[in-house]
Image (cartoon, rainbow, N blue to C red):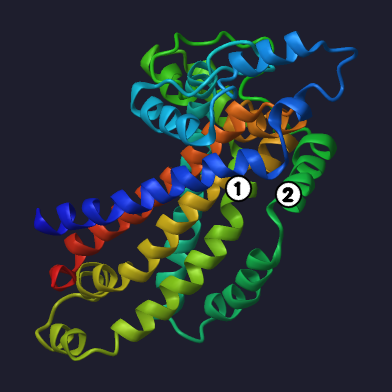
């Protein structure tokens, strides 16, 4: 408990620093009001002053920052210039789609990378091990947006097996919004046809995001497993007559997961903030697509809040990784 509390206390100055940077980003491009009104026709000084007051930009920067800082825990994240609704409403609507896509990518990467990495280490120099190395290098080298376009061209356009965009087809019966996760909501409402359709729509973007991470997970798991299975306690476990399955899964795998958890946690933070292009390619109605549209429209309040969420998500993933370290290896507490 003290370990977790210590990590939380260490995160407080980081969070404050993040809010300062995010708030300062709004002013790097110049006066937001002048930028927003640059494409509009004749604007009177009164109209500009009214617009500046609506955005809360009529006060000095210090007052604006403290208003921004105190509004975060209250859910007061400003008002969208483009959509004319509160920013919190937009983010709450779009965030579940981004989380669903991120979790799908993580699941795909673990289902592919973890078992292949373990088998490659246990059966070193086997055919699978020799094939996994160049495949992993290809996977790490491929940009996710390029892979997404190739997947759409192959499986959607050429073969017609999978849809190339959106979360559901236009003819699908949408489930009641309970969690915001399309697959889970469909399961809760027992709409099995919608579950199948949601999974089909989720597969290609999830694979485009998850495949490069699967390659990295595979290489990290293999390297860590090779180091662990040479340790004395693994040799001793085998000498006691334990089955190979028990030695690998209980003793070797658990102790080799710490580097893998680091990769998964950091990449989950990256996926949450770096899936904008994939969401654009697959017309995925998530937070990344909202940010891209808001940048084009100079919708600063939306961009500001979204960047803050991305940064906090990355911080939370690191905190969860530290907690997992403590569970897997109690020596980390010291």
Q: Is residue 206 visible?
A: yes
**Pointers 1 and 2 in contact (C-beta within 8 Å):** no
Mark 1 or mark 2, earlier in chain: 2
Residue furthest out toward the right: 41
Relative to 135, residue 145 above or below? above
Give how far across and how far down residue 245 sits, in percent: 25, 70
Q: How would you rate the neighbour count of disc 1 (Cα within 10 Å): few for under 14, some for 14-19, many for 20 or more?
A: some
Give how far across and how far down residue 85 sits, in percent: 58, 11
Give how far across and how far down residue 128 sits, in percent: 54, 75
Q: Nearer the viewer, mark 1 or mark 2?
A: 1
Say left or right for 4 vs 15: left
Q: How would you rate the neighbour count of disc 2 (Cα within 10 Å): few for under 14, some for 14-19, many for 20 or more?
A: many
Give how far across and how far down residue 188 sits, in percent: 36, 16
Which of the 4 image quadrants contains residue 273?
top right
Relative to 122, residue 21 above or below? above
Q: Secondary structure at mark 1?
A: helix
Q: Toward the viewer: 129 or 233?
A: 233
Please name the residue shown 60% across and 15% down the image: 53
Please name the residue shown 45% across and 48% down the image: 18
Relative to 334, residue 304 above or below? above
Please name the residue shown 60% across and 43% down the image: 25
Q: How far, Cα to Cα, is label 1 from label 2?
A: 11 Å
Residue at mark 1: 274
Say left or right for 57 vs 318: right
Q: Is residue 283 visible?
A: no
Residue at mark 2: 145
Q: Which mark is residue 249?
A: none
């Amino acid at each position: 408990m003290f370990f977790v509390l210590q990590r939380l206390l260490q995160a407080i100055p980081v969070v404050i620093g993040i809010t300062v940077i995010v708030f300062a980003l709004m002013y790097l491009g110049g006066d937001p009001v002048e930028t927003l009104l640059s494409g509009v026709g004749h604007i009177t000084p009164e109209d500009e002053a009214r617009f500046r007051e609506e955005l809360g930009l009529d006060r000095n920067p210090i007052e604006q920052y403290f208003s921004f800082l105190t509004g975060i825990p209250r859910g007061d994240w400003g008002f969208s210039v483009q959509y004319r609704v509160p920013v919190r409403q937009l983010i709450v609507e779009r965030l579940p789609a981004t989380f669903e896509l991120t979790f799908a990518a993580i699941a795909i990467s673990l289902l592919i990378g973890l078992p292949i990495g373990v088998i490659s280490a246990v059966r070193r120099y086997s055919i699978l091990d020799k094939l996994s190395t160049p495949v992993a290098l290809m996977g790490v080298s491929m940009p996710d947006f390029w892979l997404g376009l190739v997947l759409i061209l192959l499986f959607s356009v050429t073969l017609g097996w999978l849809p190339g965009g959106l979360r559901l087809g236009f003819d699908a019966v949408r489930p009641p919004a309970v969690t915001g996760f399309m697959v889970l909501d469909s399961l809760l409402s027992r709409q099995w046809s919608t579950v199948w359709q949601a999974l089909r729509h989720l597969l290609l973007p999830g694979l485009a995001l998850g495949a490069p991470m699967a390659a990295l997970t595979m290489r990290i798991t293999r390297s860590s497993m090779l180091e662990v299975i040479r340790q004395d306690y693994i040799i001793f476990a085998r000498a006691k007559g334990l089955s190979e399955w028990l030695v690998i899964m209980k003793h070797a795998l658990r102790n080799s997961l710490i580097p893998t958890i680091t990769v998964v946690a950091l990449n989950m933070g990256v996926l949450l903030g770096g899936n904008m292009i994939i969401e654009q390619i697959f017309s995925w109605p998530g937070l990344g697509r909202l940010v891209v549209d808001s940048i084009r429209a100079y919708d600063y309040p939306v961009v500001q809040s979204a960047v803050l969420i991305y940064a906090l998500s990355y911080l939370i993933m690191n905190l969860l990784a530290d907690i997992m370290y403590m569970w897997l290896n109690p020596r980390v507490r010291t």
